[in-house]
Image (cartoon, rainbow, N blue to C red):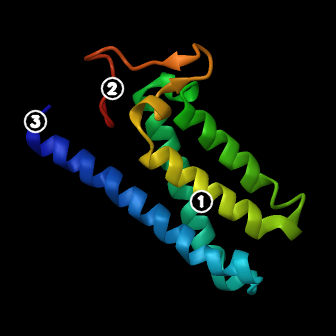
Amino acid sequence: MSETRFWIQRLSKTAIRALHILGIAGSAGGIFYGIERELWLHWWVLAMVTGVIMTVLEIKQSKLWLIQLKGVLTMVKLGLISSFFFIPQHKPALFITVLLMSVVIAHGPAGLRHYSIWHRRRIDEKKGKKKQMNG
């Protein structure tokens, strides 16, 4: 891969992640303080759309993501977010749980992020096997 393509892919992924965090931050006030939904819904939509984009890119890059802790916990986070509809009185606590899970998995050691719940050990893509973001 050329250096130019590498930087385009890297910056694109970083921009999507930045927009995702912006969407989460923008919707947090509404979730925590019960502000009118219309005031923060666009931030929530931004967070959900960019989250889906990041998930699709991860799965496209490596199917192992689905059984590694980083992928499994993303699905758990989606389940917790979905529970907003069933137990709305617990939105703030659920939101905090999702945020803390996100930090732990994003900044945890590779051995934690790449731990396979199926294999019960760390698994990594074989060298050269991992697809590039647009490849």
x then y, percent, for residue 42: 60, 75
Query: Which amino acid, mark 3?
Result: Ser
> From the viewer's perspective, is residue 78 above or below residue 118?
below
Q: Position of residue 50 (x, y in %)?
A: 50, 56
Residue at which label 3 appears:
2
Residue 35 percent location from the top left of the image: 74, 86
The reply, left or right, for residue 94 in relation to residue 39 is: right
Q: Report the amino acid beneath label 2.
A: Lys
Circles 1 and 3, Cβ within 8 Å, touching? The answer is: no
Residue at 69% across, 80% down: 30
Q: Position of residue 66 (x, y in %)?
A: 57, 28
Q: Residue at x 75, y 51 (%)?
A: 80
**Residue 60 quadrant:** top left
For label 3, the SS is loop
- The crowding category of the residue bearing disc 3, from other C-alpha atoms within 10 Å (few below 14, some 14 to 19, many at least 20), is few
State which tag comes first along the sequence, 1 or 3: 3
Q: Secondary structure at mark 2?
A: loop
**Of the residues under marks 2 and 1, which one precedes in the sequence?**
1
The tag on residue 99 is 1
Mark 1 or 3, closer to the camera: 1
Classify 10 Å Cα crowding around label 1: few (below 14), some (14-19), many (20 and above): few
Q: Quadrant of the C terminus?
A: top left
Q: Secondary structure at mark 1?
A: helix
Q: Amino acid at mark 1?
A: Leu
| Residue shown at the point (50%, 29%) measured from the top left | 65
Between 120 and 71, which is closer to the camera in this rendering?
Answer: 120
Relative side of 121 to 4, left or right: right
User: Which residue is disc 2 drawn over?
Assistant: 131
Q: Is residue 101 above or below residue 67?
A: below
Contact? badges 2 and 3 (CB < 8 Å): no
N-terminal-most mark, 2 or 3? 3
